[in-house]
Image (cartoon, grey):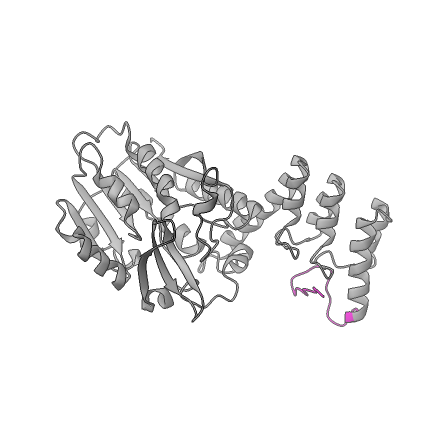
Amino acid sequence: MSIHSDDNDPNWEDGDVSTDSVVEAGRDLVYGILQNELSFDAIKAKVLNDKAPVWFQIEDGTSALHAAAYNEDVELVRFLIAEGAVWNAVDELHNTAADIALSLNNEECYTLIRDAGIRSELLLTLLSSKNALAGSSLSLVLKATDETAAGDTDNFLASRLRYTRDEHGQEICLVSVSDSEDVGVMMGWERDIMKETVNLLCTNHPNLQEGLKILNVGFGLGIIDSYFQALPTRPSQHVIIEAHPDVLQHMRELGWYEKPGVQILEGKWQDFMESEELLGVGCFDVVYTDTFSEDYKALHQFFGHLPDLLAGPESRFSFFHGLGATNNTFYDVYTHVSDLHLADIGINVDWSDVDVVEGKQDRWNETRKYFSVRTYRLPIGKMRGM
C-alpha cells in the first residue's frame, strides 16, 4: 500500500480524518478516474469537499495523476496539478504520470506535468536562500537514502576505486558500495559523448590555433582530457581539478603530471574557486565539469562561479548531463531547470542530441544503470555579450 502523507499538503489536516478514511477516499479517487466512473465535477467534489488525497497511490503505485494521464484527460491533469498532485510520483514500473502521457504521445498532458516539475524545482531554489535545493523533490528521488560511496561525496572520496576493463574490453572505473555491488564511476560508453563535447567546445574557437586555456573538473577515466590533449594545437594551459586519491595515483601512473601545460589541482573544486592556484591562471576559454557523487545543488553552485571562470563571450562551458537520467521525465525537467539557471547568470545554452543506444546495446555495463535514457542532451553554453 502506498500512502504518502505530507504535512504541507493543503488537503491534509491533523485530526480531521482517520487513516482508514484517507485510504478509502484515495482509492476511490484513483479507481474512479481509472475506470471512468466519475465526472469531472464529481472528482472536483471529492477533492475539494471530501478531501480525497490527490497524492495517494494504490498498491501498484498508480496515483490520480497517473490515472488522468492514462485517460489523456488534459482538464483533469491541470486540475490535479493545481491541487497539489505529486508530479514525480512513480508507479511500480518507475513511471511518472508524465511518462504515461509520453508513451501515449499526448504532448499536452506531458508538458503540463513536466512544467509542474520545472516550477517546483525553480520555486524550491528561490525558497532555499541559504541552502539552495536542499529540499528539492528531485534530489530526494535521485539520492533517496543512498549513503554509500555512490551517493555521498565524502564517502566516495574515502572509498577505493578499481580501474579495469569489462567483457568488451572497454576501460571502466568502479567503486564498491557493498560486498556484492560495484558502481560505475565512469564507463567507456561515454567516449562518443566526450568526443562530441570536445568537438563542440573547441572547433572554430577563435583561440584554438594559439592553444586554448582549459579547465576540467573531474578526471575519471581521462577520456575528455585526452581529447583536449589531442586537439590540433595542444592547450596552452590545461588545468584539471581532481579530489580522489586513487584517481590521482592513476593519473601519476599514466604520466599526466609530466604532460606539458597540464596543471593538476588536488582537491574538491570548492577548495579552489577563490584560491591563487586557480585565479592565478586567469580566465578560461573552455570550462567542463563532470563530478561523481555530487547532486544538482552542487552543480548549481558551480554555475555561480562561471562568470569569473570564463574569459568572455567566446568562451564555452559544458557539463556531463546525467541529471535524472534514469527517467525521461526527470531528465527533461533537469534539462530545462539547468538551462534556466544558466540563463539567470548570463549563459545561453545550445543543446545537441546524442543517441547513446543505437548499435551499442551490447556494450552497456550492468554495474549501475546510471544513464538509462536513450538520448543524451549535450549542453554548450556561452556568455551573453554585454
Camera-side residue of 182 and 292: 182
Residue 70: image quadrant is: top right
* 358 with respect to 165 (left or right): right
Q: Is residue 36 visible?
A: yes
Camera-side residue of 126 and 146: 146
Q: Measured from the top left, where is residue 71 in percent x and y?
A: 76, 43
* 226 with respect to 85 (left or right): left
For the image, the number of numbered tags is 0
Q: Quadrant of the N terminus?
A: bottom right
State whether residue 229 is above or below residue 153. above
Residue 4 included in the magenta stretch of the image = yes
Going 71% across and 44% down the picture, which residue do you hit? 69
Q: Measured from the top left, where is residue 242 in percent x and y?
A: 27, 56
* 148 with respect to 21 (left or right): left
Residue 382: image quadrant is: top left
State whether residue 297 is above or below residue 196. below
Q: Measured from the top left, where is residue 241 in percent x and y?
A: 25, 53
Magenta segment main secondary structure: loop
State whether residue 95 is above or below residue 16. above
Direction front: furthest residue: 167
What segment carries the magenta color?
1-19
Q: Is residue 51 visible?
A: no
Going 81% across and 67% down the picture, which residue do you hit? 21
Q: Quadrant of the C terminus?
A: top left
Residue 10 included in the magenta stretch of the image = yes
* 218 with respect to 52 (left or right): left
